[in-house]
Image: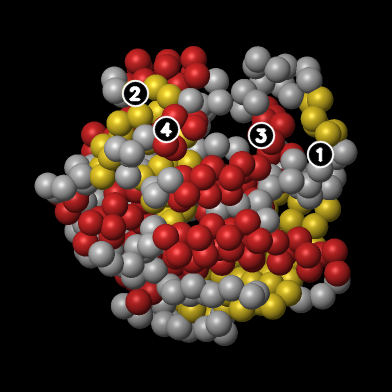
């Protein structure tokens, strides 16, 4: 089978799971890794038996690399993506697509000019849990979706992340960090969003790191850390969403969708599996629904495989840059709505991603 040769730029925390999952997918192979710190790239290459450890520029200029996985911090997502495209390489990036809308639009326009693909995390919506939910909705189990709720509420990442400062800079905060998981899942389940409303605040001006190795250092907070929003979908459905780094404890669901014929409990969109529960309008209790496909475990890299398949078969990817740009537009819109005191009409649109086939698993990429 034909394979794409892939290089990873950014060898921090998230790179490990991409490298661990490299062997699961047969339509791409990771041939090189690069990092701002060459020794970190060398350590990852040795740990996972990757042939080449590069500086970033060396990887981007390697003519044998077909696709770049961009795992850098958000502030340089756009810069690395553009450089990769300039060197004739497809790009799959971690979320968000970029920090600013203008950067995201430039990525998409340049890729289109070059005839290259852009894809973006999160790929968790391609996992068994949310794909099962997508099938249930499309098959009418809860009727027409009317409304939804989505909650991502934690105390903050300075308690566990080894280098958490970027979470509190521009392009960070709970909406830009975790919002893509929730918004992408909601769009996959309910379609594109036409209008948003938001209210945001910065609860603490400073954060103290309690994780190692930077225990005791302080972070100046430059972005809102409590964001409450309302999403109006093109379909007519409405969703209430909260993303917070200011909540110690809560007892709220990740995502629930309420339809004309029943309700659906959606699993954590930062995971690939279940459980999935449905309760139809006349049911006495919730029923757990068996997952309809593979990829219920941590399958990061699945989005790369899906995009690689799209490239190799010349079709549109389910995880393309238009979806990521729509999410970026929505996140900015929620912040801007809070600042202006007005609704924000989204300037972007994307297609609702097509559901994967029932029973889909690793063998479908072989």
Q: Is 247 placed above or below 214 here?
A: below
- Residue at image mark 3: 157
Q: Secondary structure at mark 3?
A: helix
Categorize mark 3 by other alpha carbons within 10 Å: few (<14), some (14-19), many (20+): many
User: Is there a contact, CB below 8 Å, between mark 1 and mark 4?
Assistant: no
Labelled pair 4, 2 in contact (Cβ < 8 Å): yes
Q: From the viewer's perspective, is the residue at label 3 or at label 4 nearer?
A: 4
Verify CB contact (< 8 Å) between mark 2 and mark 1: no
Count of residue discs: 4
The residues tagged by marks 3 and 2 sit, at their Cα atoms, a distance apart of: 32 Å
| Earlier residue among tags 1 and 4 | 4
Marked residue nearer the N-terminal end (1 or 3): 3
Q: Nearer the viewer, residue 37 or 255?
A: 37
Q: Is 177 left or right of 15, judged from the image as shown? A: right
Q: Which residue is mark 4?
A: 59
**Which residue is denoted by mark 1 in the rendering?**
221
- In the rendered structure, which disc, 4 or 2, sits on the residue that comes first in sequence? 2
Task: Determine whether label 1 and label 3 are within 8 Å by CB.
Answer: no
Side (left or right) of 224 relative to 351 = right
Residue at 83% from the left image edge and 53% from the top image edge: 201
What whole-number distance in Å separates the C-alpha atoms at marks 1 and 3? 12 Å
Of the two numbered discs 3 and 2 on the same chain, state the one appearing first in sequence. 2
Residue 210: where, in percent of width, then height?
Answer: 72, 21
At numbered mark 4, what does the secondary structure look like: helix, strand or loop?
helix
Q: Which residue is mark 2?
A: 52
For label 2, the crowd category at 10 Å Cα-Cα, with few meaning under 14, some 14 to 19 and many 20 or more, is some
Q: Is residue 7 left or right of residue 213?
A: left
Residue 45 image position (x, y, % from top left): 36, 20
Q: CA distance from mark 2 to mark 1?
A: 37 Å
């Amino acid at each position: 089978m034909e394979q794409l040769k892939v290089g990873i730029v950014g060898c921090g925390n998230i790179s490990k799971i991409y490298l661990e999952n490299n062997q699961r997918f047969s339509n791409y192979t990771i041939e090189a890794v690069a990092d701002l710190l060459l020794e970190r790239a060398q350590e990852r290459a040795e740990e996972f038996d990757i042939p080449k450890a590069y500086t970033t520029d060396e990887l981007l200029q390697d003519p044998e690399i077909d696709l770049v996985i961009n795992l850098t911090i958000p502030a340089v997502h756009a810069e690395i993506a553009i450089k990769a495209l300039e060197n004739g390489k497809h790009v799959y990036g971690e979320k968000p697509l970029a920090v600013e809308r203008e950067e995201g639009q430039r990525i998409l326009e340049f890729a289109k000019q070059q005839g290259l693909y852009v894809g973006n995390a999160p790929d968790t919506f391609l996992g068994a849990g949310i794909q099962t939910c997508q099938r249930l909705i499309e098959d009418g189990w809860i009727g027409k979706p009317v409304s939804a709720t989505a909650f991502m509420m934690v105390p903050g990442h300075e308690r566990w992340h080894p280098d958490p400062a970027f979470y509190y800079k521009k392009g960070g905060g709970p909406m830009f960090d975790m919002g893509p998981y929730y918004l992408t899942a909601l769009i996959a389940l309910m379609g594109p969003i036409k209008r948003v409303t938001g209210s945001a605040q910065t609860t603490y001006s400073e954060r103290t790191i309690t994780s190692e190795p930077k225990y005791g250092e302080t972070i100046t907070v430059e972005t809102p850390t409590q964001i409450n929003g309302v999403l109006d979908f093109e379909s007519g459905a409405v969703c209430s969403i909260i993303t917070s780094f200011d909540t110690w404890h809560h007892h709220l669901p990740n995502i629930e969708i309420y339809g004309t014929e029943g309700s659906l409990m959606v699993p954590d969109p930062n995971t690939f599996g279940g459980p999935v529960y449905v309760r139809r309008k006349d049911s006495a209790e919730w029923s757990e629904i068996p997952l309809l496909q593979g990829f219920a475990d941590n399958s990061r890299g699945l989005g790369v495989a899906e995009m690689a398949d799209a490239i190799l078969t010349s079709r549109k990817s389910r995880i393309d840059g238009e979806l990521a740009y729509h999410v970026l537009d929505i996140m900015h819109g929620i912040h801007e709505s809070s600042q202006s005191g007005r609704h924000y009409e989204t300037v972007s649109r994307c297609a609702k991603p097509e559901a994967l086939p029932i029973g889909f698993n690793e063998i479908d990429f072989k």
